[in-house]
Image: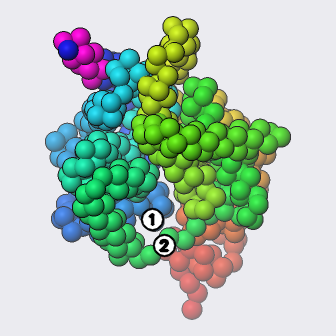
Amino acid sequence: MARARWQQAAVLCAPALAALALYADVTHAGFVLDDRAAVADAPLVTGPASVGDLLAASSPAARPDLEAPSTWRPLALASLRLDARLGAGEPRLFHTTNLLLHVLVVIAAALLLLRLGVPPPAAAPALLVIALHPVFAETVASLLGRGELLAALFGLLGLRALVAGELHGVVALALALLSSESAAFFLVPGFLLAFRGHDRRPAVLLLLVVGLWLGARTAVLGGLSPPPSALHNQLTSLDTLERLRAGLGVIGRYLGHWLVPHTFAADHGPAVDLAGPNGAYTIIGGAGVMALLAAAVSARRRRQLTLLLGLLMALVGLAALSNIALLLPSPLSGRLAYLPAIGLALALGGALAGHLGGMRQAALFALGLWLGAGVPTTRAELHAWHDDASLLALTVEAEPASVLARVRIADGALRRGELSLALRHLQAARLLAPHDPRVLSGLARVLERTGQPAEAWRLAVAADAAERRPGQARATLCALAATRPELDPVAVHRACPEPGPPAPR
C-alpha cells in the first residue's frame, strides 16, 4: 500500500516538475507577433471593461482580423485582464501564468489517468509526453494559447469527475467551453462518460450546458462567421475533393509533428503545400486516421476506457483541424494542436496500461529516447519566442515556403532600415506568392525608399487591387500618392479620402 502511494505521488509530481524546469525560460519571453495586438494593445485586456463587455466580445484584439470572428472566449479574456492588472501590463506575468497552467494541465492529466485506474508505471510516460514534447511548446509560449491551456485544465478535471458520475464535472466542462471553442474536443468523451452509469443527470445537464453555450455563442457572434480569405487559408478556394486531400495532408503534418518531434512553424502562408510533396502528408494523414479509428474500435470492444477516451479526443480534434468540414483562420497552428496531442498522450497511457505485463525494458528505453530527442527542440522553440526576429528566423528555417514569416521579417527589417534584408525576403516571398498584397505592398515600400518610385507605384496599385478589404496595401498606396503630385487628384481622393488631396469642386 505504501509503495502504491509513493508511486502515485511520484506520478503527480515528477512530470509536473519536469515541465516546470523545461518551460521556465518562457517567463522571459516578450509580446511576440500577434500577442502584441491581442494582449498588449487590446483595449479589452488593458483598458476599462465591464463583465458585460467581456461576455459580448468576439475578439480582444486591437486589430479585428487577428482572430477569427468565430472566437468567443470570455474566461480566457478575463484571465488575461487579471494578469494585465496584477502585472502592470508587463509580459512576464502573462507568460508565468501560461507556464503554471501547463504544469497544472500535467497534474490534471495525472489525476485523470489515476482515476481511470491506469498504473503509475504506465501513466508516467504519457505524462512526460505532455511535459516535454515540443508539440505543446507554442501553446505555452504564445499568449493567444491561454484559451487552450484553460480549456485543457478544466476539460481534464471535468472528465475526471465524470468518471465517477459527479455532476461538478459538467460545470468544469462548461468552464472549458467558456475558455475556448476547442474544448468541444472534450464533449464526445464527456458524453461517453456521462451516459455510462445509471444516473442520467450528468448527461442531461451536459446537454443543457452545450445548448446554452451554443445559444450564447451564436447570439454574441451573430451566427456563423464567413470563411477566411485565401491569403490566410489556402484551402478556402479548393473544391471538395481537393480540400479532402489537403485536409488529410494537414492531419498528416500534425501527426508528423507528434511522431517525429520537430519545430512547429509559427506562421504559414498560401505557398505552403499542405498536402506535401507527392502526397506524402496525405498518405500519412489517411493512414493515421484509419489506424486511430481501428484502435478506437478495438478499445471499445476490449473495454479499454482510457485508450478509447484519448483516441476519441484526438480523432475529434484532428477532424476539426483538418479544415475539411470547417475552415479555420489558419490551416495549421501549433496552438490548436495542444488538445488533440493531449488526447494522444492519454491514449498512450491507456495502451501502456493494457500491455504493462508484457512490456519490455527496450520499449521503455525507446520511448525515453523519443522524448529525449524532442527536448532540445522544445528548448529552442521556447527560446525563439523571446522576440519577433528569433521566432520568425526559426519559422523560416522550419518552413521556408512561409510567406507570412518572410513578410514579417521584411517589415521588421524595414523599420530598422535594413533594406537589403527586406528586399531579399520579399523577393523570395514573391516567387512563392506572386499576387499576395502583403508581398507587393512591402516591395512597393522598399522600392520607394531605394529611389524607384514608378515601379513602387505600380506594385502598390496591384497590391491594393488584390487586397480583400482596405488595409496595409491601401495605406501604402495612399502614402505613395501623397508624394506624387502628377496623379489625378479625383482618383487619389476616391482611394484615399483622408490622407489624399482634397476633392476638387
Q: Which of 139/267 is in front?
A: 139
Residue 448 spot, x, y in % from top left: 67, 52
Label 1 is placed on what type of residue? Ser
* Left or right position of 350 against 404: left
Q: Which of 17/43 is in front?
A: 17
Point out the residue furthest to the right here: 278
Q: Is residue 86 above or below residue 349?
A: below
Q: Is residue 143 above or below residue 195?
A: above
Which label was assigned to residue 224? 2
Q: Residue at x 45, y 37 (%)?
A: 304
Residues packed near mark 1 inside 10 Å, few (<14), some (14 to 19) or many (20 plus): many
Q: Give the range drawn in magenta.
A: 2-13
Q: Which residue is drawn at 43% across and 54% down?
A: 188
Q: Which of 327/79 is in front?
A: 327
Label 2 is placed on what type of residue? Leu
Callout 2: SS: loop
Residues packed near mark 2 inside 10 Å, few (<14), some (14 to 19) or many (20 plus): few
Point out the residue furthest to the bottom here: 505
* Left or right position of 502 against 187: right
Asked whether residue 419 is in view, the answer is no
Q: Report the magenta stretch's main SS.
A: helix
Instruction: Give yes or no for residue 167 being in the magenta stretch.
Output: no
Residue 430 spot, x, y in % from top left: 75, 48
Q: Which of 370/33 is in front?
A: 370
Asked whether residue 165 is in view, the answer is yes
The picture quadrant where one finds residue 160 is top left
Mark nearer the N terminus (1 vs 2): 1
* Left or right position of 284 against 306: right
Q: Do the residues labelled 1 and 2 touch (CB within 8 Å)?
A: yes
Q: Which residue in the structure is indicated by mark 1? A: 70
Q: How far apart are marks 1 and 2 (CA)?
A: 7 Å
Callout 1: SS: loop
